[in-house]
Amino acid sequence: MIDYGMFKSRRFWILSLFLIICLLILFSYFKGQSLKVQPSFQTSSMQDLHLTNKEDSAVKWELSAREAIFPIGGKEIFLKSLDLKINRTPVIYLASGAGVYEIEKGYVTLDKSVEMNVKDTKFTTNSLKWNSAEELITTDDDVKFTGKNFLIEGTGLTAAVSQQKVRILKNVKAVFYSS
């Protein structure tokens, strides 16, 4: 009679020896070589960023962010949890969950639920762009202005900061409350 258990045990040992030899050959081949990983998107980052934009000796606007990511190329900065203070009369405060500062153009794009406060007025939208060269705030999203005695809603907005002119572009609905 033939003992099949002996053949199974012998096959196991031969297969194990073959795998060990293959691993040793692979390790000896790669021993002198090093593996280099090249990331496709290199960045630097910073916590608690604060930028001040001055014209002559006056501070025109200030940008603060909890986190800033600087990709290689230096044309834009990705921001998280940001505040933008526009030093005009009245002072305009903008806050957002995320945004991008395009350095060469001087644009700050705010995303993820934007809130703007001017005096006793609160403005909310999904995204907004600040053009510092033209001192212009724009959005194509739905907007909502709330104040002590009014509520104004619509779609799209342009605000010329230096001229203190705000224009809701379409679908304007207004409710005024008596005091």
Image (cartoon, rainbow, N blue to C red):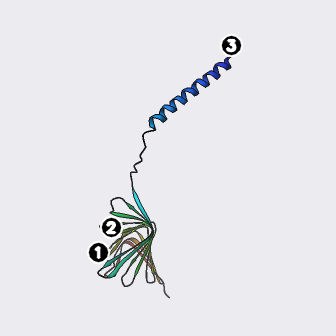
Q: Residues within 10 Å of mark 3 (few under 14, many from 20)?
A: few
Up/down of 36 relative to 157, above or below: above
Q: On the image, numbered disc 1 is attached to which residue?
A: 134
Which residue is depicted at the point 47% across and 34% down? 28
Which residue is depicted at the point 62% across and 21% down? 10
Q: On the image, numbered disc 2 is attached to which residue?
A: 103
Disc 3 marks which amino acid? Ile
Q: Nearer the viewer, mark 3 or mark 1?
A: 3
Q: On the image, numbered disc 3 is attached to which residue?
A: 2
- Secondary structure beneath dot 3 equals loop
Dot 3 and dot 1 residues touching (CB under 8 Å): no
Disc 1 marks which amino acid? Glu
- Secondary structure beneath dot 1 equals loop
Question: Residues under labels 2 and 1: Cα distance?
Answer: 15 Å
Measured from the top left, where is residue 13 in percent x and y? 61, 25
Q: Residue furthest front?
A: 32
Q: Nearer the viewer, mark 3 or mark 2?
A: 3
Disc 2 marks which amino acid? Ile
Question: Residues under labels 3 and 2: Cα distance?
Answer: 83 Å
19 with respect to 82 (left or right): right
Tell me which corner region of the image, top left, top right, bottom left or bottom right, holds residue 141: bottom left
